[in-house]
Image (cartoon, coloured by chain):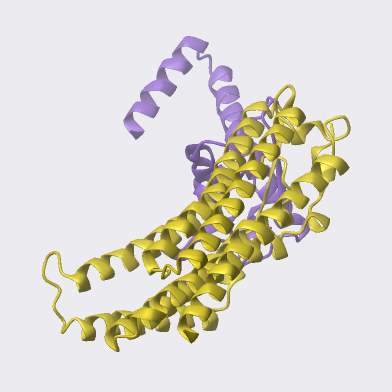
Chain colours: A yellow, B purple
Amino acid sequence: MTTSIIVYAAAIGQLYLLSYFYPKQIINRISHVLDKYPASTHPKLYPTENGEERAKKGLTRYKYITRSTLILGIILMVGALITKTEIKDSMVTLFAMLQFFPFMLLEIAELNHYKLMREENKAPKRSADLKRRNYFDYISPLKFSLAVIMFGIYITFNLYRNDFNLSFGSDGLITLVTIIGVHIYFAITVIWIMYGKKLDPHQEHKDRDRHIGGVVSTTYLVSIAVSTFLLIYGLLQHYSLDPWEPVALSIYFQLCAYIGLGTMLRTNTVENINFEVYKS
Amino acid sequence: MEIVINIDDETPLFSQLMEQIKKAVQSGNLSAGDSLPSIRQLANDLDLNNKTVAKAYRLLERDEVIVTRGYRGTFIHEQAKKNSDRDLNAWVALELTKTIDTLKHAGAMDSEIRIAFAEAMKKER
């Protein structure tokens, strides 16, 4: 009974954080930018004709999608309570994927917006900071070593739990390949954001630096969260504490949202961004 | 320290990069041992071809304004301040003008000078 209450509490927390709290923060942020920096005063912020209208329509679509997810979540939760259905870890994962989907759409829309900005940018003058960007400018080697240690602990634990059996198709090998794949993805993201093409052609150097810092911190914290979660999840399976698995999964997804979205929203506040660069 | 290039300017882009790095050294904005961005980073930040930045870096290295230390990156040379005053292009133009004057004074014709210059360049290769 106690376990069920905790599972429901975790699921409600997940529903609140991923389908209400963060979407609301994002909607408020975009609305604030649209109101305070319109196309009439900041044309470079809206690269296409009717760019402001398009942005407003996009925001409305985003509102509908997140609200639909929230309503669906409430219906599922009430339905599960009435029918006394046990919430399984697969249900938590599937619903989290659905909750993360609007954020993914938003990310794609943002990248498309930057692409249009670059295409529209006809300014003959281009500037760059004459300073080499280094990973450790954004995160201390001590903090970085903590992520490496956590990664090492999980790998060792995974090998031990699977009796050092890494034969083709074994659980140990699949988990190992997955976690290494996730970290390769993080590394590529960081390299791309640090040394790749400037996404926003008008962005001030210090704003870009802050954005890079946010991405580096997020990937670093998510790396620790992934290793820690997999370690806890493995321990729960090892000690046959299966009923706690949905709780661990739900907390993990909430933590990922807090780290991923929360860090970006906290480090890159609208007040800190220089919008003067988007004036004509 | 910010670097600004103008793609509409008649001065080649690699020359604009070289001039600004040299000016930054002369003004003290860049000192010996300071690190410079990698070729890829600077090219992407300025939306230029990697080859343009690589050419500027190669010529600055030749002039001993910068030094490349393998994977550790590119740094300002110890003697950069002294060397950034040197303009090899201007020196080449001056020396050639002097030589052409001497040859013409001796009675050589333009076509003879051109052929001899082309031959000398071929031998160098």
Which quadrant: the C terminus of chain A? top right
| Relative image position of residue A220 (x, y in whole percent) | 51, 71
Residue appearing at x 47%, y 76% in the figure: A247
Along the line of sight, which residue is nearer the eye, B10 or A30?
A30
- Residue most extreme to the front: A82
Residue A215 position, x and y percent, is 58, 61
- Give x and y (percent) for residue A70: 60, 54
Does residue A90 sit above or below B110 in this rendering?
Answer: below
**Considering only vertical position in the picture, is B27 above or below A199?**
below
Left of A192 or right of it: where is A212?
right
Vertically, is B108 above or below A81?
above
Looking at the image, which residue is at 79% across and 45% down? A31
Residue closer to the observer: B107 or A234: A234
Residue B52 visible: yes
Looking at the image, the residue that sits furthest to the left is A167
> Is residue B76 visible to the viewer in this orientation of the structure?
no
Looking at the image, residue A166 sits to the left or right of residue A242; the answer is: left
Report whether B77 appears left or right of A37: left
Picture coordinates of residue A269, whole percent (x, y): 76, 59
Quick check: B29 above or below B104?
Answer: below
- Describe residue A22's horizontal placement relative to residue A234 as left or right: right
Depth check: A250 or A184 in front? A250
Circle count: 0
Which residue is pictured at 74% across the width and 35% down the height? A56
